[in-house]
């Protein structure tokens, strides 16, 4: 029995090392794709752009100009929907699920011109005009601008937005139970990520919000601090069992969130 066990162990080790069993393991074909490749993989048109900021960062911007269900009318002018990811994610979040559960694909199929941005430092925005990615200067961001800040402080941008959809919005972290946030708070003397001063009440954009009662990052108590500050609040929904990542990858995210987004857009055209 011991000899048989040793032989089986040897076969498993040898096979794994030399690829004997590797070809039998199912591999997600999207695992090694970039955003453009994923979009094309599912049969959607894709466009990629490099946007250079005033301080030299080169950000990846991706576009799905139309969907598979409305490709015959690709030249028609379409309403633009811009998707911006949150903390520690990238634009790939909007297309990482199946097409019937990915907001980027759903919006394209609903007839919209979909654009997806990437914040500096994310996987698809790690280029700079003159700084090396591995330099401390590259990562010394002067300020990270979030949507609430932008719409509250830059009226020219806010005027261009018809509706702002905020999924699991992080406004205050006073009650956050996220281990990541707690660790960052303990290292606040070392980490320089101080947010600029702004007043959400100055944001004059129609806003719809969704939040989860099981969200450790956007804690319900913090969300409750935010909601009364939103002056033009047109819709809010709390989902009792949703955590932060469920707004991207929840099994029922289409029924709980995405179809409502599309309905609100269509009802406000």
Image: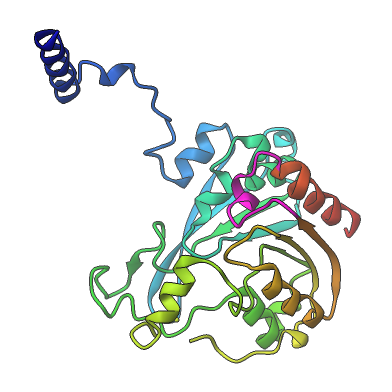
| In the foreground, 247 or 241 | 241
Indicate the quadrant where residue 189 lies.
Answer: bottom left
Residue at (70, 68) in percent of width and height:
220
Colour basis: rainbow
Taking the image as shown, residue 99 lies to the left or right of residue 24, namely: right
Taking the image as shown, residue 131 lies to the left or right of residue 51, namely: left
In the rendered image, residue 77, in percent from the top left (x then y), is placed at 75, 52
Which residues fall within the magenta stretch? Answer: 240-252
| 115 vs 13: above or below | below
| 118 vs 254: above or below | below
| 84 vs 232: above or below | above
Residue at (75, 71) in percent of width and height:
161
Main SS, magenta region, reads loop
In the rendered image, residue 202, in percent from the top left (x then y), is placed at 76, 88
Residue 96 colored in magenta in the image? no
Residue at (67, 33) in percent of width and height:
68
């Amino acid at each position: 029995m011991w000899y048989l066990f040793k032989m089986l162990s040897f076969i498993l080790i040898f096979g794994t090392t030399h690829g004997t069993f590797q070809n039998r393991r199912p591999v997600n074909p999207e695992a090694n794709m970039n955003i453009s490749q994923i979009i094309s993989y599912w049969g959607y048109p894709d466009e990629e752009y490099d946007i250079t900021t005033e301080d030299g960062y080169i950000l990846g911007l991706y576009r799905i100009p139309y969907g598979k269900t409305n490709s015959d009318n690709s030249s028609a002018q379409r309403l633009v929907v811009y998707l911006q990811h949150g903390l520690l994610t990238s634009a790939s979040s909007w297309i990482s699920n199946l097409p019937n559960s990915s907001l980027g694909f759903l919006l394209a199929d609903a007839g919209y011109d979909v654009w997806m941005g990437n914040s500096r430092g994310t996987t698809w925005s790690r280029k700079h005009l003159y700084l090396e990615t591995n330099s401390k200067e590259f990562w010394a961001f002067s300020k990270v601008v979030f949507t609430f800040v932008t719409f509250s402080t830059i009226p020219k941008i806010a005027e261009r937005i018809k509706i702002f959809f905020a999924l699991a919005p992080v406004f205050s972290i006073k009650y956050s139970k996220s281990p990541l946030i707690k660790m960052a708070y303990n290292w606040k003397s070392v980490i320089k990520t101080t947010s600029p001063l702004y007043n959400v009440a100055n944001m004059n954009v129609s806003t719809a919000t969704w939040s989860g009662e099981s969200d450790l990052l956007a804690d319900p108590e913090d969300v409750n601090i935010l909601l009364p500050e939103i002056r033009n609040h047109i819709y809010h929904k709390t989902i009792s069992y949703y955590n932060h990542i469920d707004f991207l990858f929840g099994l029922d995210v289409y029924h709980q969130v995405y179809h409502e987004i599309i309905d609100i857009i269509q009802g406000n055209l």
